Image (tube, rainbow, N blue to C red):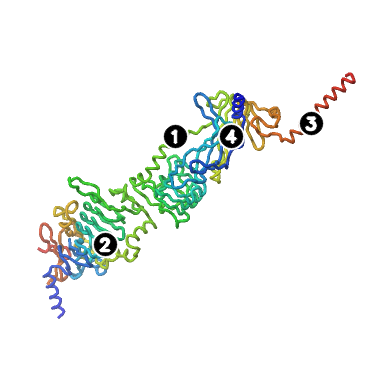
Amino acid sequence: MRKFVALLFATVCSLFGVSAHEYSVGDIIEKDGVSYKVLVAYLIVDSKESPDTVKGVDKFYCSGELMAIKVDEGLKDVVIPPAVGRFKVIGLTDSLFYGHEHDRIWLPYLYFAGNGCFANLKVRSGALVVHNIDYLGEGVFDGLEGDLIFDINKKVMWGMSFKKMAEDSSFIACGPTGLVKFNTRMMEFAKSCPMYNLCYTATSKNYKAWLDKAFNSDADFQKNVLADPYARYNKRNYSTTPNAQRKKGWTISVGSSNAKGKGYPWGSLTRDYYRVAKYSVINKKKKKTVYYKDFIPVSDMTKKEGWYVKFVGDEGEVKSMLNGKIIK
Amino acid sequence: MKRTILLLLFLASYVIASANQRGVTFEKDGLVYTISSECVFCDYKNGKYIVKNEGEAFVSGVTASDCEVVIPTVVTFPSTYGRIDTTEATYHVLGIGEKAFEGAKLKDLFIPLGFKFIGDEAFHNMELSSGVLVVPPVVRIKANVFDGMKAKLVFRDLKEASMAPVKFESTFKNSEHLPDIYVSHAAYGTRVTGVDKSIFYTIGETVFNEWISGWTQINLEKTKNGLNRSSSLMLSDGKRRYAWNDVWIKPGKIDKTGSDIDLLPDYVYECRTNYMSKSEIFQELSINETLFRGKKGEEYFYYSIDGKPITDKESLIDDKGQDPFGLQVISQEELKKKREVKEREKSLNQKMNQLKNILGF
C-alpha cells in the first residue's frame, strides 16, 4: 500500500515536472485591492528542512518575483507588502498610481518603479514615503501632490525620474509639489539625486516626525515592512549531495536577471518587463559553473535515490544523477 | 568776539578730556546700543595723522517695530574721551546683548558678519514677518537665544575660514520652543561645540541661496562701506616704525576672552619712548599738542610730545588745580590751603623784608 501511494505521488510529480508550483510567469494575483503580475518563477527550499542537501522532489517550493500592476482607486490606505506568499514584490508598473488619491501608501523595498508611477498622485497624509528603490523610470514623481520622503539606505539609479518630455520633445524638470526630503545620515545617497540642491534633510527626532506625519503617527502602519511570513522559504542555494561530499554532485544557486532586449524597462515600459530565472550550477568535482534557465527535480522511483535532476539551458536539456553523473 | 569763540572752541577740542563712556547706552535708528569700551586711535589721511576716538558697542535693545532692521557694523555717538578732532566717536558693533530683541515684532532683521557674541535669550519670542532669520557665524552664542522665536532660523555658515568654530553655550537647551533650524548641506559637516547637530535640518544650495539672498545683499553693501580699523598712534615724525626717537603708542586689549561678553575689557595703551628702559602699559591715554598723559593704577604720568617725562607735575597745574586735560589734580580745599600757605609765606617774606630794612641788614 505504502509503495503504491509513493508510486502514485511520484507519477503525479513527474507529470507536472516540479512540485509545489503555485503560479507561472504571467499569472495575475489579486490581494487586498492590489493586482500583481508574476514576472519570474523559480524553485527554492525551506531552510529549516534542509540544512545542506535536498533529499526529495517534494522539498522544493515555487517562489518568484511580482510586479504591482493595478491598485484599486477606492482604497484609503494602500499597502504593497514585501511579498505575496512566497513571491517577492520587486517593482511597480508604469503609471500605477497615476491620478490616484489615497490617505497613506506603504511601499516595500523595490527594484524598480515605472514611468510616471506616482505622477499626479495625491497622498492625503501630506507625504509619500519611498523606501529603497533601485531604479526609477521617467517622470516618476511628476505632479505628486505632497512631500516626497526618500527613506533610503542604498544607492538609487535616478535616471530621468525628475524629468519629463515636453511638447517640443525636449526634457523639462518635474517633481512633487511639496518638498523632497532625505535622512541627513544618508546624505551620500542624496548627493546623486537631481533634486539635491532643492532638497531638505533631517535626522533623529526631526526625521521621525516627518515619517510619523506621513503615516498619520500610526506605528502599526510602519510595521508593514516586516510582514514577510515566508521569509524562511527564501533559501536559494542547495546541493544534490551532502556538503561533506566535496567531489560529488551539484551545488545549485537560483536567482533572476533582467531579460535585456525583451523590454528592458528603463526608458521603456515596465508592462513589457521581463525577468528570467537563472540557475548557477556548479559541478563540485570540476568546480565549473554553468548557467541554466530552468532546473527541474524529477521523481524516478526506479532509482535508489528516488529522483534525479534536469537542467534546461540554451543548448537543451541536461539530465543528471544526484551524484553528478550525466544520464544519457 | 567771534574770534574769541573760535579760539575757545579750538582750544577746547585739544584740551577737553574725560573718562571713557563704557556702559553708556544710546539709541539710534531704532536700535539701542551700549558702549562696551572706548579708546583713542589715529588715522593717517592726506599726509596727516588725525587722532580720533573709536570703540566697541553692542546692541542692547530695539525700539523699532513692524519694520526692517539692519544692524550696522559701526555706529557713531558723541564722545569727549581723550583727545578728539571730531565731536563723534565711531563704535564697532560687536554683538547682541542679553534679551536685546525679546518680544520684538519686526518685518526682517539683518545681522552682519563678524559678530563676537549673542547674549542670553537675545531673540526670545521675537516675531519676524519675513519668516526667516539669517545668522552668520558668531564666536559665542549664549543660552536659549532663539527660544520661542517665531521664524525659521538659518545659520549662514557654522564657521568662517579665519575663525574658530562657533561656540554654542546652552543655546538650544530649552528644546520645547525651538524654531526649525537650518544649515546648508555643505555646512552640516562643520565642527561645532556645545550642540547636537541632529537638531538641524539641512537644505540644498538653491533653497539656501534663496533664503539668504536679502541678507547677502545687505552685507555686500555693508562691506563696501566698511570702516577700516586704525592700528596705532604715533607722534613725532609719524612714520610707522619702532624708531626709538619716536613716541610709539599702541592701543590694545590684554584680556581678549573676558568672561563677561557684553562689557569687553577696557583698552590699554602700550607706550615706548626714548626715555623709557621698557614699554609702559597705560590704562588711559590723553593727548594734546604739547604733551600726553598716561594713567597707571591710580597715578598719572605726563610726557612732553617728544617723549620726555615731566617730573615737575605741579608746574602743569593751573590756578583751578586742573591738569592741561581738565583733570582735577588738586581739590579745591587743598588748593585753598596751598594758596593760604603761599599767602602766608608771601606775607611772612614781606614782613621779613620790612624787618631787614628796619634793622639795616
Query: Which label belongs to residue B167?
Result: none
Q: Amino acid at mark 1?
A: Asn
The CA distance from mark 3 to mark 4 is: 35 Å
The residue lying at 41 percent from left, 40 percent from top is B218
- Do residues under tags 3 and 1 come within 8 Å of each other at their CB atoms? no
Numbered mark located on residue B341 in the image:
3
Sequence order check, earlier mark of 3 and 1: 1
Residue, disc 1: B225
> Where in the figure is residue B138, as x and y percent of width and height?
46, 44
Determine which residue is flagged by label 2: A102
Q: CA distance from mark 3 to mark 2?
A: 105 Å
Q: CA distance from mark 1 to mark 2?
A: 57 Å
Q: Residue B324, how many percent across, how many down?
A: 65, 29
Instruction: Specify the amino acid type for callout 2.
Output: His
Q: CA distance from mark 3 to mark 1?
A: 60 Å
Q: Which residue is mark 4?
A: B80
Question: B65 above or below B317?
Answer: below
